Amino acid sequence: MNINYLESCLKNLFCYLPDSEVQNVGQISKAMCKIAKNELQERDQKLEKLLSTYTLTHQFNIKNLKEAALFLLQERHSSSQCSLDQIELIVFLLSRGQVIIIFEGEPSLEKVSNENPYLKHILSLTKSTHKENLYAIGWDELKEAYELDALITQEFDKHNAQLNEKRYAVLLKADEKLAKFFPSGDELEELKRLATVKPSVLQPRAFSFSEYFTLFMKRTLAHGERFLSQEIGNPECTAIKENLDLIANLFNTVQSPYLDLQIKSAKDYNAMAGKTFPIRTKSLTNTLEGLDKFKSEHCIPNAVAILIAGGEHVNFTEEEPDDPNYDLTPIKAELTHHRAVILRPKYLFNQAETDCSRSPCDLLSSI
């Protein structure tokens, strides 16, 4: 609408109102403007606080954050704080409008189930009136990675099961020779129980038999050594020293192969990651390419997209990668067609800051 025409209409309207009514309208308008201004200031302050934990590493086709339609958030999967910060930012943005969350570990451009733990947490913190603003899809392709992962896990479990039989024999011999130095009888019974438990994804790693056995035996041997150091001259010391040496040697016969098995497994996982990384890079790129089509199909042209990925997947550097499997050029090239920013948690990635690394709050001036 033409602003001059609007002013003319308002003048014509006000000319028929008493001065007192015109004054009231003016006061109400000023009060509403003040409220709106305060709300905008509070929103900016909240957003600035949420973004203060991130470093802006790259921006594409924007001069301020108001123009960004795509946020790529780097994360370290083992950090719960990283996830909490992401969720808080997403919940805030949902209160402002439509948001597309693009998850790692979920099939590219497919809808993510509400049973996804991360998504469930977001929904639990989102007001019911804002939940309709949320769209959740994936960007990943993990079929081959899952298959290779299963093979590596099966091989590890097979050899570890063989070692578990030897561990159990060492445990029984230690029970015969060094029971007085065991941390506790209850722990021994728990160890015996875990020795019969089959490997399972539901079995917490910290309480697997192999890990618990290692900790238990190290504590037992340490208790025995402490006793010897404090009871020098005790007639029992000679026999105890012989038993300690015997059990320590038996412990090493199973511990050394276990360390070798862990090293081999780690190398296998690294090889698997290198082999599947290019597949996942292509999938992420294809997801970004299909983002506009997804918005069009769901009639959400102005939705903000938030892509969550492990740090390596969007960690662009000027140097060529040592391994060509980790080349991110396709993703970077695709991002030149988007209005996007990449944000990295300050407290997780202590990499040298590049010239383009700065606080995202620097881009808030125009919001």
Image (cartoon, helix red, strand yellow):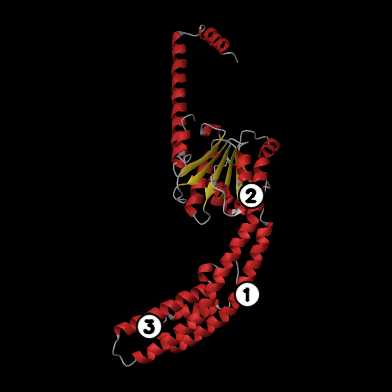
Q: Are marks 2 and 1 in contact (CB under 8 Å)?
A: no
Residue at position x 31%, y 82% from top? 229
Give the amino acid type for the residue marked by disc 1 in the picture.
Answer: Lys
Give the number of the disc on residue 224: 3
Give the amino acid type for the residue marked by disc 2 in the picture.
Answer: Thr
Q: How many marks?
A: 3
Does the rendering let one see residue 183?
no
Q: Which residue is under mark 2?
A: 281
Residue at position x 36%, y 91% from top? 238
Query: Which quadrant is the N terminus positioned in?
Result: top right
Taking 31 as reference, is 106 above or below it? Answer: below
Q: Is residue 238 left or right of residue 23?
A: left
Residue at position x 65%, y 65% from top? 150
Q: Nearer the viewer, mark 3 or mark 2?
A: 2
Query: How far is the residue under mark 3 from the one under mark 2?
Result: 53 Å
Nearer to the camera, 157 or 125: 157
Q: Nearer the viewer, mark 2 or mark 1?
A: 2
Residue at position x 45%, y 85% from top? 247
Q: Which element type, helix, strand or loop, lies under badge 2?
A: helix
Does the rendering let one see residue 258?
yes
For marks 2 and 1, the one nearer the N-term is 1
Nearer to the camera, 165 or 353: 353
Instruction: Give the quarter of the image for residue 6.
Output: top right
Nearer to the camera, 15 or 229: 229
Q: Which residue is under mark 1?
A: 158
State the image coordinates of residue 170 (x, y, percent, origin top left): 50, 84
Taking 271 as reference, is 332 above or below it? Answer: above
